[in-house]
Image (spheres, rainbow, N blue to C red):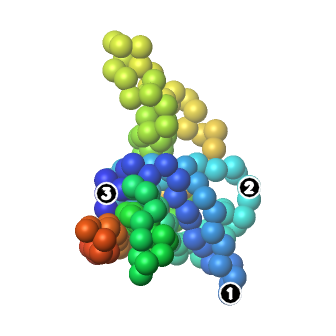
Amino acid sequence: MEQVLKNAEVGRLALADDKTPYIVPLNFAYLSGKIGFHCDWTGKKLELIAKNPRCCFEVDEYVGEVSYHYHALCHLDYDSVIATGTAHIEKDEETIWQFFQTLHAKYKEIYRKPIENGGKVFDRKRVKECPCVIIDIEELTGRRERTVDGKRSKLMWQHKF
């Protein structure tokens, strides 16, 4: 499940606005049992987190081609993970810097390269430019579906922190 969280490029944050669900796609980083993302200082995500920090975060990765299921071409092999937990705006600048460095390294090769090979490190002075929202994960559930010899195979995982 951690590998799926590290590799997925887009995650979906699900929040509750009283009785109305709200979900939004995000780029994100997974680090040490936590999910982090940045956003603007204003907006619906932060309003909802302030009202109810309980949340859910989903990622998925599709692999292979569409295959047959019950004689119809309608099945995709995939991995998915759902994280449930509590979100907050992080205050610790070291934690924010670690998440921003991880986030930049995930999406830009120059942040993955060693400094001696032309790589960059995220500028610590920039940690206050936007909020870093951290989801403290309480539980992960995962699912892997594959088609093997024309039959679907499922594998499920669960981990509580």
Tell me the amino acid under the disc marked 3.
Answer: Glu
Foreground: disc 3 or disc 1: 3
Residue 45, percent from left and from top: 66, 63
Secondary element at tag 1: loop
Q: Which residue is mark 2?
A: 42
| Residue 19, label in figure | 1
What's the CA distance linking mark 2 and mark 3?
30 Å
Residue 85, percent from left and from top: 44, 71
Vertically, is 5 above or below 106?
below
Q: Does the residue at mark 3 contact the one at mark 1 (Cβ under 8 Å)? A: no
Residue 26 vs residue 41, the one in the foreground: 26
Taking the spot 31% from the left edge, 62% from the top edge, the residue there is 1
Q: Is residue 110 left or right of residue 20?
A: left
Residue 91 visible in the snapshot:
no
Taking the spot 55% from the left edge, 63% from the top edge, the residue there is 12
Vertically, is 9 above or below 71?
above
Secondary element at tag 3: helix
**Which image quadrant is residue 15 in?**
bottom right
The quadrant of the picture occupied by the C terminus is bottom left
How many marks overall? 3
Tell me the amino acid under the disc marked 1.
Answer: Lys
| Residue 89, label in figure | none
Q: Which residue is mark 3?
A: 2
